[in-house]
Image (cartoon, coloured by chain):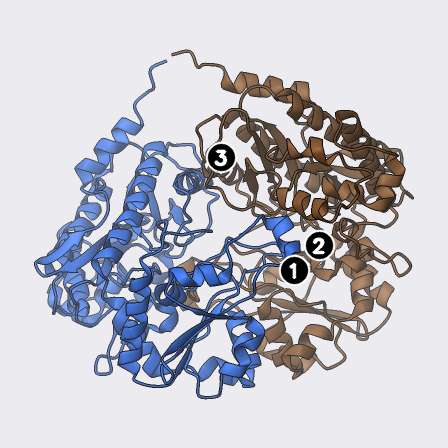
Chain colours: A blue, B brown
Amino acid sequence: MEIKLFSAQTYVERRNTLKKTLGKGVVLLLGNDESSINFKDNWYPFRQDSTFLYYFGLNLPGISALIDIDNNREIIFGNELSIDDIVWTGPQPSLASLAEKVGVTQVLPTSKISDHVSNDTAYLPPYRPEHTVKISQWTGKGIASANSDYSVPLIRAIAQQRSVKSAAEIDEINKAVSITSDMHLAVMQAAKPGMKEHELVGIAVQKAAENNVHLSFPPIMTVNGNILHNHYYGNTLKEGQMLLFDGGTESSSLYAGDMTRTYPVGSKFDSRQRALYDVVIDAHSAAVDALKPGALFKDIHLLACKKLVQGLTQVGLMKGDADEAVSAGAHTMFFQCGLGHMMGLDVHDMENLGEQYIGYTESLVKSKEFGLKSLRLGKKLEKGFVVTIEPGIYIIPELIDMYKSENKYADFINYKELESYREFGGIRVEDDYVVTDAGSTLLGTPLARSSNDVEQVRAKALEPVAL
Amino acid sequence: MEIKLFSAQTYVERRNTLKKTLGKGVVLLLGNDESSINFKDNWYPFRQDSTFLYYFGLNLPGISALIDIDNNREIIFGNELSIDDIVWTGPQPSLASLAEKVGVTQVLPTSKISDHVSNDTAYLPPYRPEHTVKISQWTGKGIASANSDYSVPLIRAIAQQRSVKSAAEIDEINKAVSITSDMHLAVMQAAKPGMKEHELVGIAVQKAAENNVHLSFPPIMTVNGNILHNHYYGNTLKEGQMLLFDGGTESSSLYAGDMTRTYPVGSKFDSRQRALYDVVIDAHSAAVDALKPGALFKDIHLLACKKLVQGLTQVGLMKGDADEAVSAGAHTMFFQCGLGHMMGLDVHDMENLGEQYIGYTESLVKSKEFGLKSLRLGKKLEKGFVVTIEPGIYIIPELIDMYKSENKYADFINYKELESYREFGGIRVEDDYVVTDAGSTLLGTPLARSSNDVEQVRAKALEPVAL
C-alpha cells in the first residue's frame, strides 16, 4: 500500500540524528514480511515495522536496511519484481526509485545482506518470529542468542528520538485521532438495544475502510467493560447496560489514534452508572490538567488514582484517607491498569523496544506491584510527547472475591456496599494529548465526553426515525 | 474466539483414520500463535492452523498436539491461564475441559513438549516462521533443516483425508458460501459511480462482522480486474468501468467461501463488456457441466480454455483452430491462471502442504508452463471434493506488448483488434461446487450470474431513491 511520505530530507535528518547519537557501528533495521494466516500466500494486511518506517519510510514487505555509521552510508536490501510478478501485480515502481524518495541511493538484493552483517551489528529486539529467523540466518547466531543479543544503546537512542514528535508528526497523529473520533461517533450513533457487539465492530471497521485505513489495534467492544482485554463480540446489547468501545485507527501515514468511550445502551445512565462515570471524568480532567513538560507521568497516574478514590469514597464504595489508600494500593480493587501510554507510529509507541526503555529511565525502574506494574509510562514528560489519558473503574468479581477472602484493604474498601456492584461492569474514558510548553492539547476532533454530552448523543441516536 | 465444534467423536475418528493410514510413528501438529502486527501484544485476529483444527478442533493460540501412533495416544500441549491473566481476560475454561470436547484426555504444559519430540517425529511444512522456530527449538535441528525435514507420507495421508469432505463439512462450507454470497450482494447493491474501492471493501468487511466471521482472504475489489493480485483500493468507480470483487468469508466453524463477480459500475455492460462477459459465463457453465467423479480437473481447465478461445474467436480477438490454440498456449494471452482450486478449511485448501501434493499425484506432475503452472488442481475429482470454478478474461497491456514483440501466437491472436482492448480490464466469475455422484452441486445461496441477472441487480441498485 502506498502511504503518505514525509520529504526525503526528513528521513535523511532522522538517520543523521541517530548516527550522531550512536557515534559508531553498523545498525540493521528489519522491515516486516507479509504475515501468513493459514497458508503462505494468504496474508494479513501488511504492516511495516514502525522503526523502519520512521527511518526509511517505505511500506513494502520483505525489505531491510543498514545504517553504516562507520562508513557514513545507508543501504536498502530487497528484491525487484520479476516480469512474472508484474503479470500478477501490474507494473510497480523499482526499489531504487522508491529508495530515492527517502533519500537512499544504494539498493542491493536481499541475498547480499549477510555480506554486510556481522556479530557486532546492532539490532532491535525481535518481536516477530521472522525477525528471529533472519537475524539467526544472517549472523549465524542461534535462535536464543538472536532473540537476546539486541543492542540496548540502539534502543535508548531510538526511544529518545522517536518519543519527541515533530510538528509534522503531531499533524499526522491529529489526523489519525480525528478518523478515530469519527469512528467512535458512528458507533455511538448506531448502538441500539438488541444489537450484537460484533455488528458494532462492523460499523467501526467500515468507518476505517471508508477512510482507507486500518484499525491501530483489535478493538474492545463490550457490554462487559470490566474484562480488560476483551475481544469477544458475541453479546447482545441490553437496555440498562453500558457499552465500552476502545478502538483506534491509523492515518494514511500509519500514525495511530486510540480512544475509549463508555455510554448507556439506552439513552441515559442510571444513577449509579452516572455517579461512577462522573468519578472517572473527574480523574480524567485532573490528569489532563497536570500534563506538562517536566511532570512525572507516574505522579499524574497516582493523582488520577487519588481522584478515583475520592470519588469512590463519596459514592460510598471506599473510605478512609485517599492518599493512604493509594499508597497502600487499595485503588487497584477498581483501577488495575495504568493511566496511559505513549502513542505515535505504534498505538503503544515503541512497545516492541521494551517498556522499561520507553516509559522509564535508568534511575526510574518500573514497579512490580499489582497496578503499577501495568503502568507503561512513568518518566518525566517532554514537550512533543503524545500520550493517552485513560482512567477507569472496573468491577471484577474474581478480584472482589480474592481481596475479600484475604480481608485486603479492609480499611479502605466498603465490601458490603461493593457486593451490590458485582455486576456493574466497567467504565473507561480515553483521549489523546500532546504535551506542549503550556501544558497539553487534545488531539483529534473533540467527541462528547461529559455524562451530559454523551447522553445527548445517545438520546438523539435512539430517537424514533420519522418514516 | 469460540467456534462451532463437531462432536468429540468426529475428531477421534479423524485421528483414528490418520493413525490407520500411517500405521506407525509420532506426528506433531503445530497450532498457530498470535501474530504480532507492530509490537508483540498487538495482534492480528487469531487464526488457528487448519490441519490442527481438522484433527483437534481447538481455536486457541499457542497450543500443539501429538498423535503418538506407536503408543496409541494423543496429547495436547499448552499453558493454563494464571490468576493474573484472568483479571485481564475474565474467567476462561481450562485446557483440560476444552480438550475433552475434542476427545483428548491428556494435556501437558508446553515446556514438556521437547521430551516427546525427537528427530523422527513427523511434521508438516512450516508456513509461519513461528513454526520453524518451534521445530528448531524442540528437535535441535537448524533452521534450514527444520524447514525442509517435513514428512511427505504425513502430507499425503492428510491431503487424502482432508480432500474428501463429509456431509457435515459440506454443510459448513455451504454456510460459509452463503454468507459470502450475502456479502457479494450487499456490495453489488451498494456500488455507485463516484465511490472509492475501499468504501466497498468497508461494506464487505461490515457484512462479515455482522455475521461475526472473518474474511477468508484479503479481498480483491478493483476497477482494474486485469491486475490479478490487486490489493490496492484507491480508485474511484466511474461509469463505463466494470468492478471486479473477489472475496469470501469464513463460517463460524472456520470453513471458507470464495466467490467473484464482475459487473458494470453503471447499470449496463457496454456491448464489448457484455460480449466478453458472456464468453466467460459460457466457459464457466461448460466447466461446471464437466464436474464429476473421475474427471481430471486439468481436462476441465483445458475445456474452459477452449470455450474461452471459441468465444474470443467469435468476438474477433482470436482466430484459427481452438484446440490448436489451447494446445499451443495462446489462450494465456487472455487467461493466465487456473480454472479453480480445492476449498475447505482453507480457501486454497491445504495450500500450505504443497500444491503438488494437494492438486496432483505422483504420476501427474504440475506443469511448469506459463498458464498451467498456475493451475493449483489437476488431478481426478472424487465425490466430496469442493472446488471453485473461476474462468476469466484479463487484458494485460504488459503481456500484449511482450507477446507482440516476440510475434508469439500470431496464428491465433488478432493483435490489431486486441490493441483497441488495451484498457478493457478483466472479468472473472467464480462460484463454489461440491462434486457429487451425479456431477456437482452449487454451494451457498445462488447469486445473480448471467449478464441479464447481473444487470437487473445493478439497475435496481442505481434506481433513484424516493425521498
Cα separation between marks 2 and 1? 8 Å
Q: Viewer-proximal residue, A174 or B9?
A: A174
Quadrant of the rendered image containing residue B268: top right
Mark 2 nearby-residue class (10 Å; few <14, some 14–19, many ≥20): some
Cα separation between marks 1 and 3? 42 Å
| Chain of the residue where label 2 is placed in the rendered structure | B
| Residue A55 position within the rendered picture, expressed as x and y whole percent measured from the top left | 36, 67
| Chain of the residue where label 1 is placed in the rendered structure | B
Reply above or below: A68 against A84.
below
- Check disc 1 and report the residue beneath it: B100
Comparing marks 2 and 3, which lies closer to the viewer? 3
**Residue B178 appearing in the image:** no
Q: Which sits earlier in the primary sequence, circle 2 or circle 1?
A: 2
Quadrant of the rendered image containing residue A335: bottom left
Q: Amino acid at mark 1?
A: Glu
Q: Which sits earlier in the primary sequence, circle 1 or circle 3?
A: 1
- Check disc 3 and report the residue beneath it: B200
Reply above or below: B130 against B199.
below
| Residue A212 position within the rendered picture, expressed as x and y whole percent measured from the top left | 42, 43
Which residue: 84% across, 41% down?
B326
Q: Amino acid at mark 3?
A: Leu
